[in-house]
């Protein structure tokens, strides 16, 4: 049985090795070095385009737990990354050359993998395929995706507002309400600012450091969607007449409209994460934390995701993909950043996940979606649950099912424990060696 994987990045290499280890013949297509992308610098497989860090290792951190899960389920690329480790305290940082060379060896020496150094330009909905072409997928493949799913379901830039964890908010400093009390239940949490705080907030935004766009991103970012720091620079009242307008939001505690307000809207079904509505930003991460802490309700906010605006090809996954990450009505699965799973570890994880789903489909297993208490189960639900404001996201604790504990501080420990219990009870590879 032969399958195709397009893209020799983190997700495509993980998927290829998992499928080949399970006994499938894999054709892995990688277009570099013949055709490059604006961010890659080499022709190597699994090139890290930016930082050399896979983030934290401590089991108590979201990325540490995620890595423990990948290790538990036998991730091939995580094992190679750990062999290429360089000293970086509690984080997994790697020598990128050593890592890429090890991935090249693993792929090149695998008897079931054929590496095709060509750009894939066509998609056959009837052929078992994993598309893992990343945030800078080639133009011609993008055209083929347009033809398959429609151009309105594929995006080229993300414009992300910060997302905060509900448990970290000061709920005494905000109120639940919809503008003009429309709707049956309040969908928004409103964080009021008095005049003095609003002016300090706007001043801080105007003076703040932003992330410089990369050369290939210049001039393309701000159409129709201004970053908040840019709005602040246009005039001290601009935000108060834009995303921070208080009109229709009378504070029930004072019976007055606040001077300005930041609205928070639930980011996930279980309402454990909230995004700051209209607050897309290019501010540096540390600066975001400092500036938003000026808002009383957000003083201690824990950020599940910081705001960002950058070039990024990704699908409207909730509309396009099934929970298995398969494009509806086809035999094509997607993995990596293309699905909206942001980050290196997420790319490896979704590569493994898509491989497990393809195997299950080829074996005729009816449902193989991972338990929601696992990191990949939770992340893939976030990618595919209905979401009108879908934007890419890293894995974080807010995605795992909420655990009811007597004390708020015990919730993360309960989530970690539920996750580990789920690993014990579920193996995506239980029937790995079964004939197809
Ligand atoms: C500029 C930039 C910086 C980033 N920095 C970080 C960071 O520091 N940390 C982090 O965690 N995440 C970062 N990300 C986000 C993301 O996690 C990484 O881009 C990650 O490498 C994505 O993995 P992937 O496998 O989905 O895609 P990639 O690793 O990009 O792999 C996709 C592969 O597909 C190939 N390809 C594309 N089109 C075709 C085609 N038609 N035919 C054949 N091959 C094709 C590409 O050449 C590439 O090798 C960054 C993203 C960008 C764009």
Image (tube, rainbow, N blue to C red):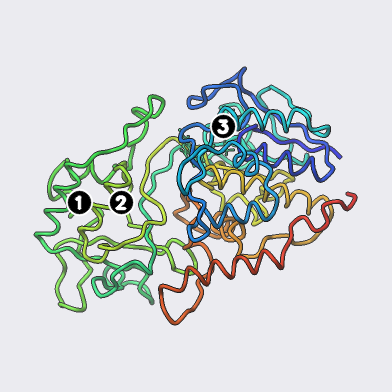
Q: Is residue 143 visible?
A: no
Relative to 126, 35 lies left or right? left
Of pointers 2 and 1, the one earlier in the residue sequence: 1
Q: What residue do we see at 50% from left, 40% from top? A: 93
User: In the picture, residue 105 is in which quadrant?
Assistant: top right
Residue 156 position, x and y percent, is 47, 37
Residue 365 position, x and y percent, is 81, 59
Task: Pick the residue in front: 128 or 290.
Answer: 290
Q: What residue do we see at 41% from left, 25% from top? A: 216
For label 2, count other residues whose C-alpha is less than 10 Å away and answer few (under 14), some (14-19) or many (20+): many
Q: Nearer the viewer, mark 3 or mark 1?
A: 3
Instruction: Quickly name the residue at label 2.
Output: 279
Residue 191 position, x and y percent, is 25, 65
Relative to 81, 432 lies left or right? right
Is the residue marked 3 within 8 Å of ligand 1, measured from its CB?
Answer: yes
For label 3, count other residues whose C-alpha is less than 10 Å away and answer few (under 14), some (14-19) or many (20+): many
Q: Is residue 109 visible?
A: yes
Residue at the bottom extreme? 406
Q: CA distance from mark 3 to mark 1?
A: 35 Å
Residue 271 position, x and y percent, is 44, 68
Residue at the right extreme? 435
Q: Nearer the viewer, mark 2 or mark 1?
A: 2
- In which quadrant of this rendering is ligand 1 seen? top right
Of pointers 2 and 3, the one earlier in the residue sequence: 3
Q: CA distance from mark 2 to mark 3?
A: 27 Å
Q: What residue do we see at 61% from left, 62% from top? A: 374
Secondary structure state at the residue bearing disc 3? loop
Q: CA distance from mark 2 to mark 1?
A: 10 Å
Instruction: Quickly name the residue at label 3.
Output: 137
Task: Pick the residue in front: 123 or 5.
Answer: 5
């Amino acid at each position: 049985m032969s399958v195709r994987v397009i893209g020799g990045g983190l997700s495509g290499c993980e998927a290829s090795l998992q499928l080949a280890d399970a006994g499938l013949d894999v054709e892995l297509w990688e277009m570099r070095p013949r055709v490059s992308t604006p961010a890659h610098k080499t022709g190597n497989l699994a090139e890290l385009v930016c930082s050399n860090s896979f983030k934290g290792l401590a089991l108590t951190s979201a990325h540490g737990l995620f890595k423990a899960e990948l290790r538990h389920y036998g991730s091939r690329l995580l094992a190679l990354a750990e062999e290429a480790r360089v000293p970086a305290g509690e984080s997994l940082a790697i020598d990128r050359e050593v890592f890429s060379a090890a991935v090249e060896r693993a792929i090149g020496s695998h008897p079931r993998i054929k590496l095709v150094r060509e750009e894939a330009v066509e998609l056959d909905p009837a052929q078992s395929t994993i598309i893992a072409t990343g945030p800078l997928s080639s133009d011609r493949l993008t055209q083929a995706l347009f033809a398959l799913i429609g151009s309105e379901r594929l995006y080229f830039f993300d414009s992300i507002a910060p997302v905060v964890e509900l448990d970290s908010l000061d709920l005494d400093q905000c109120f639940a309400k919809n503008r003009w009390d429309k709707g049956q239940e309040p969908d928004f949490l409103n964080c009021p600012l008095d005049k003095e705080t609003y002016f300090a907030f706007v001043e801080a935004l105007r003076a703040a450091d932003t992330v410089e766009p990369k050369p290939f991103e210049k001039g393309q970012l701000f159409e129709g969607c201004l970053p908040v720091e840019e709005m602040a620079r246009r005039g001290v009242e601009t935000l108060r007449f834009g995303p921070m307008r208080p009109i229709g939001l009378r504070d029930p505690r004072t019976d007055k409209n606040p001077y300005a307000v930041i609205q928070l809207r639930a980011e996930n079904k279980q309402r454990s994460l909230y995004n700051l509505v209209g607050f897309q930003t290019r501010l540096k991460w540390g600066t975001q934390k400092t500036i938003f802490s000026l808002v009383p309700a957000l003083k201690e906010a824990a950020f599940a995701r910081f705001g960002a605006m950058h070039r990024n090809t990704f699908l409207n996954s909730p509309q396009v993909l099934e929970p298995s990450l398969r494009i509806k009505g086809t035999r094509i699965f997607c993995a990596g950043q293309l699905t909206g799973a942001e980050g290196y570890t997420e790319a490896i994880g979704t590569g493994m996940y898509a491989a497990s789903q393809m195997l299950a489909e080829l074996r005729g297993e009816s449902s193989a979606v991972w338990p929601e208490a696992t990191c990949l189960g939770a992340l893939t639900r976030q990618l595919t649950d209905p979401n009108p404001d879908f934007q890419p996201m890293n894995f974080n604790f807010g995605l795992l099912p909420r655990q009811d504990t007597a004390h708020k501080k015990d919730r993360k420990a309960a989530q970690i424990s539920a996750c580990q219990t789920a690993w014990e009870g579920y193996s995506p590879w239980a029937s790995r060696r079964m004939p197809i």
